[in-house]
Amino acid sequence: MRSTAARPAGRRVSSSRGGAAPTRTERVVERRVERDTERDTERDVERESAADYIPSRPTLQKLRVAAAGCHGCHLWRLGTQTVFGEGPSRARLMIVGEQPGDQEDRAGRPFVGPSGSLLEAALAEAGLDRGDVYVTNVVKHFKWESRGEKSARRIHKTPNSSEIRACRPWLDTEIRLVRPALLLCLGATAAKALVGNDFRITRERGKPVTVPEFPTVMATVHPSAVLRTPRESRAKAERAFVADIERAARWLGENG
C-alpha cells in the first residue's frame, strides 16, 4: 500500500527584499512554481488509485469502511470526509452524481443539500421512494476552491479526468455489488464517466443507452444545474428534470 503521508503544499517564492511587494520577475517565478506543483499533483493522481483500498471480498459495508480511509488521490486533503453511496443493497435504480457538495461533505451523506431536496421531490413526483434508490457519486470527496483570502465559502470545482479515474474503482464495485437495472446519471461528469466523453446530455437526456459491461444508463441534468437556472426559467427547468425522472420510472416499470 502506498504511503499516505501528506505531501507539502505548493511552494511559495519569498521576496528577498523584506516586506516589499514582489517584483514582476518574482511573480513570474512564483506562477511557474505553482504550475510545476500542479503538474506534480497530476502525476501523483495518475499513479494512485482507489483500487489499492478495495477489500478482497467486498460488501457495501466493507467498501464504506475502506473508503473512509482512502488516500487514492489528493482530494482526501480537501474533503472533510469520504462521502460514500447509500441505499438498498439490491436497488433496481442507482443514481450517480458527480461529487458531494459542501453540505454533503459536512454531513457525510450524498444528496442531502438543496440538490438532494429537489431530487427527492422529483423522485416522489415520479412515484419513486428515495429509500428504494441507491444514491452515490463518481468522486467521493468534495473538490472545492475558495474565492478570495477572506471568503469562507467553499466553491465547487469540477473533478478532472485523473481524479475521476483514481476514484472510479469505488463506483465500479458499487455497481457490481448492487446490480441495478438502471443507472441514472445526474450531470455531464457522471454521464461521461460511464458512457464516454462523446456523450451529450443536451442530445441524449432521458434516453436509455446501452453500455458494455454496465446496466442500462440514462442521464439528465444535475439538480444543482436546475437550481442555478434564472428565476424566470426555473419552473420550466424543474418540469423537464421531473419528466426525465418519470422516464426512468417508466423504464423500470416496463423492464421489471
Image (spheres, helix red, strand yellow):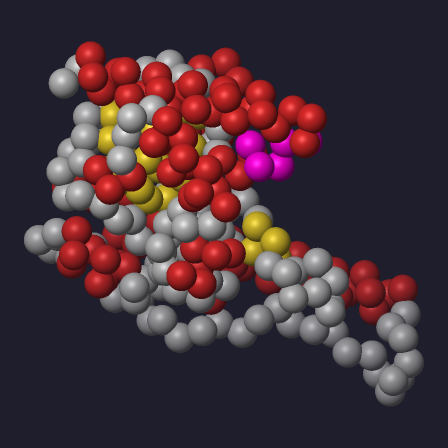
Q: Most extreme residue toward the left, as rendered? A: 57
In the rendered view of the protein, which quadrant contains the C terminus?
A: top left
Whether 3 is drawn above or below 52: the answer is below
Q: Could you tell me residue 64's position as x and y percent? A: 23, 57
Q: Residue at x 30, y 66 (%)?
A: 69
- Foreground: 105 or 45? 105
All told, the count of numbered labels is: 0
Asked whether residue 228 is drawn in magenta, I would say yes
Res. 105 image quadrant: bottom left
Task: Tell me: residue 122, above or below residue 154.
Answer: above
Question: Looking at the rendering, which quadrant does residue 145 occupy?
Answer: bottom right
Residue 186's x, y, as percent?
42, 33
Task: Relative to 60, say whether 177 is above or below.
Answer: above
Q: Is residue 70 shown in magenta?
A: no
Residue 196 in view, yes or no? no
Q: Is residue 60 left or right of residue 122?
A: left
- Is any part of residue 62 visible from this angle? yes
Residue nearer the viewer, 108 or 49: 108
Residue at position x 20%, y 12% from top? 254
**What type of secondary structure mainly makes up the magenta span?**
loop
Q: Residue at coordinates 50% horizontally, 21% vertically from top-left?
A: 239
Q: In the figure, is residue 14 to the left or right of 187?
A: right
In percent of width and height, residue 20 lies at 91, 80
Residue 255 percent location from the top left of the image: 17, 15
Give the residues in magenta: 226-230
Q: Residue at x 33, y 71 (%)?
A: 3
Q: Residue 95: which quarter of the image? A: top left
